[in-house]
Each structure stands twice: as structure tokens, then as C-alpha cells.
Amino acid sequence: MVGSLEGKTVLITGAGQGIGRAIAVEAARQGASAVAVSDRNGVTVTETAELVRGAGAKAEAIVCDLRVRDDIEEMVTRAATRFDGLDVLVNNAGVIDSALTTDRDHGVDSLSEEVWDTVYEVNLKAVWLTTRFAAPFLRRSPRGPAIVNAASVSGLVGFPNCPAYGVTKAGVIHLTKVTAVDLAPVRCNCFCPGVIDTPLAQDFFASAEDRAAMERELVAPQLVDRLGRPEEVARLACFLASDSAAFITGSAYVIDGGALAWRGVKG
Ligand SMILES: NC(=O)c1ccc[n+]([C@@H]2O[C@H](COP(=O)([O-])OP(=O)(O)OC[C@H]3O[C@@H](n4cnc5c(N)ncnc54)[C@H](O)[C@@H]3O)[C@@H](O)[C@H]2O)c1
């Protein structure tokens, strides 16, 4: 696998921690020439940039709040200008309902409008806007341009107590398809993780009354009996971004330890 992003310039959102950071490091390991990493958290994204340099690529840390349109436009322009073009965009950043409220109950009949709007703006509108601003650069790329979006299994089936999250992730899956259609030959695919051990997942467990029970409940339907690892998702994302996936576009890839393969729960 190493070397399959050889020479490409990459922009990754939400790269301050978790899956985004893992994708940034994996892209550098796979030979990307330059990786622009962005996040609203300037401290963590600067750390990620250092990790990228340590893995052998040039790096640029960009502070950007994806709720702010002008921030998004500036992030894309800065990445493309700094590295003389853009070959790969990874729309990774995401937020979940439970992280934005102290209420334990944030179901479809109790979620606040404010939380709904924030989740929508970060998880769906920002993915579209980033894609829109990146499109002219990607169209000019001579190195197999590609977009990879972070969706979720919660965009494919219903999960309790995270309505805005699931709805926006379903939107990301469809946005992936219309992007692949409208921007072809720029490819666009998304990954749909199950439960991956990152701060986002840990926050979701913590929002339950019994944190350990929540974790057990989410892992129980999996055929692989553990939490997923950010590095495992990063390898899928980098494959989808690479020329090895040249015939793949408009698709959603589930990476969930087998949870959606059946309707069972292991005893
Ligand atoms: N961890 C999981 O179990 C899981 C499962 C399915 C899908 N996903 C998706 O994968 C992606 C990465 O998830 P993760 O678990 O690494 O999340 P995480 O919360 O650990 O990291 C997300 C990053 O996005 C950044 N971010 C959030 N809001 C932002 C904003 N307004 N502007 C800029 N940056 C912002 C955060 O600062 C953080 O660094 C997300 O889209 C998430 O929905 C994760």
C-alpha cells in the first residue's frame, strides 16, 4: 500500500484528532508530497502538521471554523496556493448531537434547533461548500483528483438519540453521489465507519447514563469484537483517494466490523 498517494497534494478537514489526524499521517506515509491539515482547534492541528512532517510530507496547519463560509473559502485557497494545486480533498470533520448539549435526552422529539443547525452546518453544508470551493482546483489536477467524504453507518440505518447526526450523514452519502456525477472525472466516494475509538465516540459513550453499557451495546452487533481504530479507517480513506481506486466513484464504503452484515447480536 505504501506509496499509492505518491506526489499528491491533500487537504483534510477535522484533522486535529481522531480519524482526520490518522488520515493525514497515513497520506504522508503513502507518499503524498504535501498535506494541508485544517481544524478549528489550532493547537491540535499544529501537532498533526508536525506528525505529517515526521512521516515525510510537507505540511500546512490551517485554523478554520467550518461553520464560517469565508473561513472555508480561505482554507481551500490557502492550501491550493501553498502547494500549487490540490489533488485530494478529504471532508472528514464531523460533530455529533450529544457533544453539543448536556441534556441526556436528545432524540428527535427533544433535540434543540440550535444543535440541529450546528450539526447540519458542520456535517453537511460545510462538506458541500468545501467541495464547491475546491472544485476548480481539483478539476485542474493532472494527478487523478479525488474527494473522500466521512459519512457513517448512522447514515444507512437509524441509531437512537442522534437524529441530526444520522440525517446529515445520510445527506453526505447522497452528496457523494451527486458530487461524483457533477464533477466527473473528479472521483468522489465516502467511508461509513461503525464505532471507531476516537474522542467523538468516547463523548457519545459518555453521554449515556452507563458509559460502559453503551459501549458494549454498540460493539455487540459487530462480528469483530472490538472498537475500530482510526488507522483502519485512514487506510480505507487513502485507498479511495489513490489511483488504485481509479474505477471507483459515487460509492459508500462500510467499515464497521460487520455490524450491518446481519440483524443479530452476539450472545
Ligand atoms: N468515531 C466514530 O465512531 C465515527 C463513526 C462514524 C463516522 N465518523 C465520522 O468520521 C469523522 C471523524 O470523526 P472522529 O471520530 O475522528 O471525530 P473527532 O471528534 O475525534 O474529531 C473531529 C475533528 O473535527 C473538528 N471539528 C469539529 N467541528 C469543527 C468545525 N466547526 N470546524 C472545524 N473543525 C471542526 C474537531 O475539532 C476535531 O478535531 C466525522 O465526520 C465523524 O462523523 C466517526
Image (cartoon, rainbow, N blue to C red):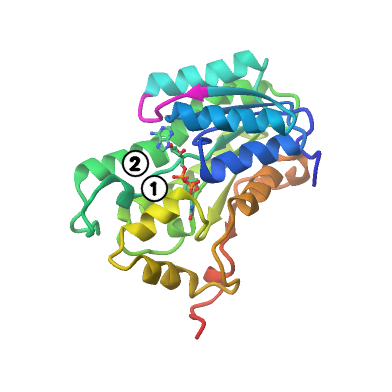
Residue at point 39% right, 44% down?
95
Which numbered circle lies on residue 120? 2
Q: Does mark 1's beta carbon lie closer than 8 Å to ligand 1?
A: no
* Residue 188 appearing in the image: no
Counting labels gives 2
Q: How far is disc 1 from disc 2 in space, using C-alphas?
A: 6 Å
* Residue 156 appearing in the image: yes
* Magenta stretch: includes residue 64: yes
Which numbered circle lies on residue 168? 1
What is the magenta range?
62-68
Badge 1 or badge 2: first in the primary sequence: 2
Q: Are discs 1 and 2 less than 8 Å apart at CB? A: yes
The reply, left or right, for residue 226 in relation to residue 243 is left
Q: Position of residue 161 (x, y in %)?
A: 30, 60
The reply, left or right, for residue 119 in relation to residue 247 is left
Relative depth, front residue between 20 and 239: 20
Q: Is residue 207 shown above or below 59? A: below
Q: Is residue 206 shown above or below 127? A: below
Q: Position of residue 255 (x, y in %)?
A: 59, 59
Q: Position of residue 159 (x, y in %)?
A: 37, 64
Q: What is the crowding at mark 1: few (fewer than 14 residues within 10 Å), some, or many (at least 20)? A: many
Residue at point 55% right, 25% down?
134
The residue type indicated by label 1 comes to: Thr
The residue type indicated by label 2 comes to: Tyr
Q: Secondary structure at mark 1?
A: helix
Q: Secondary structure at mark 2?
A: helix
Give the dominant element type of the magenta stretch: helix, strand or loop: loop
Q: Quadrant of residue 51?
A: top right
The reply, left or right, for residue 178 in relation to residue 101 is right
Q: Position of residue 1 (x, y in %)?
A: 80, 47
